[in-house]
């Protein structure tokens, strides 16, 4: 029981207080506290803080910031912006028109216009115009007549117009006129008489007509009377 208060007091912080602050305080704050603020603060701010603003911070604004506005602006607007309007304008058909050779300009619209039927009409030969569907249209007889050769012109209308009696009478010989149904029609005796040769006209009334009444008619009553 006697040792309890002494031991407890010795273990009591009040009894240990003179020994604790000297031993523990001297050990803890001197070892840890000076080491923490001095070593850590000196190590962290001196190593990290100076390294951050000097190495990282100056590197960011000095390396990136000058490169962003100065280098990028100098590279983007100066390199791209002059190239954009100039290169794009140069690639623009309006800007390429002066750069294009005159042969291309003349070839594009003139070749396309030359492919136009209106421009091809003067360049086409007259033989192609005759084969053109516009020129071969039956509603345009002037183009057909102009495109047809002269050898076909007289042959086509004269041969294809058999219904025209005037063209047949002028072109057909006189021997065909007699065989023509229009000329052989009994309603037109003048055409038959004009188409018949003169050799047939005297032979019919003189040879055939007198032979029938002179031979048969006189022979009939005489023979009958004799019988």
Image: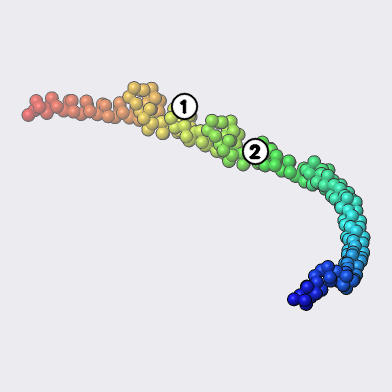
Q: Quick check: marks 1 and 2 in contact, CB under 8 Å?
A: no
**Quarter of image, res 37:** bottom right
Which residue is tagged 1? 166
Residue situated in front as seen by the camera: 15 or 63:
15
Residue at point 50% right, 33% down? 158
Residue at point 58% right, 35% down? 134
Q: Residues within 10 Å of mark 2 (few under 14, many from 20)?
A: few
Q: Position of residue 47 (x, y in %)?
A: 90, 65
Residue at point 36% right, 22% down? 188
Q: Position of residue 67 (x, y in %)?
A: 89, 55
Secondary element under disc 2, as helix, strand or loop, is helix
Above or below for 101 versus 168: below
Whether residue 217 sits left or right of residue 84 in the image: it is left
* Residue 55 in view of the camera: no
Q: Earlier in the sequence, mark 1 or mark 2?
A: 2
Q: CA distance from mark 1 to mark 2?
A: 42 Å
Q: Residues within 10 Å of mark 1 (few under 14, many from 20)?
A: few
Image quarter hosting the C terminus: top left
Above or below for 3 versus 182: below
Which residue is tagged 2? 117
Whether residue 112 sits left or right of residue 12 in the image: it is left
Q: Position of residue 210 (x, y in %)?
A: 26, 26
């Amino acid at each position: 029981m006697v040792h309890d208060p002494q031991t407890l007091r010795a273990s009591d912080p009040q009894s240990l207080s003179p020994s604790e602050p000297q031993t523990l305080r001297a050990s803890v704050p001197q070892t840890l506290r000076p080491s923490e603020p001095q070593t850590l603060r000196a190590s962290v701010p001196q190593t990290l803080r100076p390294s951050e603003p000097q190495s990282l911070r100056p590197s960011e604004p000095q390396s990136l910031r000058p490169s962003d506005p100065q280098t990028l602006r100098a590279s983007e607007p100066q390199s791209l912006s002059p190239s954009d309007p100039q290169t794009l304008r140069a690639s623009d058909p309006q800007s390429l028109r002066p750069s294009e050779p005159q042969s291309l300009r003349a070839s594009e619209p003139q070749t396309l216009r030359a492919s136009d039927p209106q421009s091809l009409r003067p360049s086409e030969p007259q033989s192609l115009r005759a084969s053109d569907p516009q020129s071969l249209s039956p509603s345009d007889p002037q183009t057909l007549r102009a495109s047809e050769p002269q050898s076909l012109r007289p042959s086509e209308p004269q041969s294809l117009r058999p219904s025209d009696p005037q063209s047949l009478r002028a072109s057909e010989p006189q021997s065909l006129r007699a065989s023509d149904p229009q000329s052989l029609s009994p309603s037109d005796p003048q055409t038959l008489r004009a188409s018949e040769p003169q050799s047939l006209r005297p032979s019919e009334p003189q040879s055939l007509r007198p032979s029938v009444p002179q031979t048969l008619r006189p022979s009939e009553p005489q023979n009958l009377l004799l019988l």
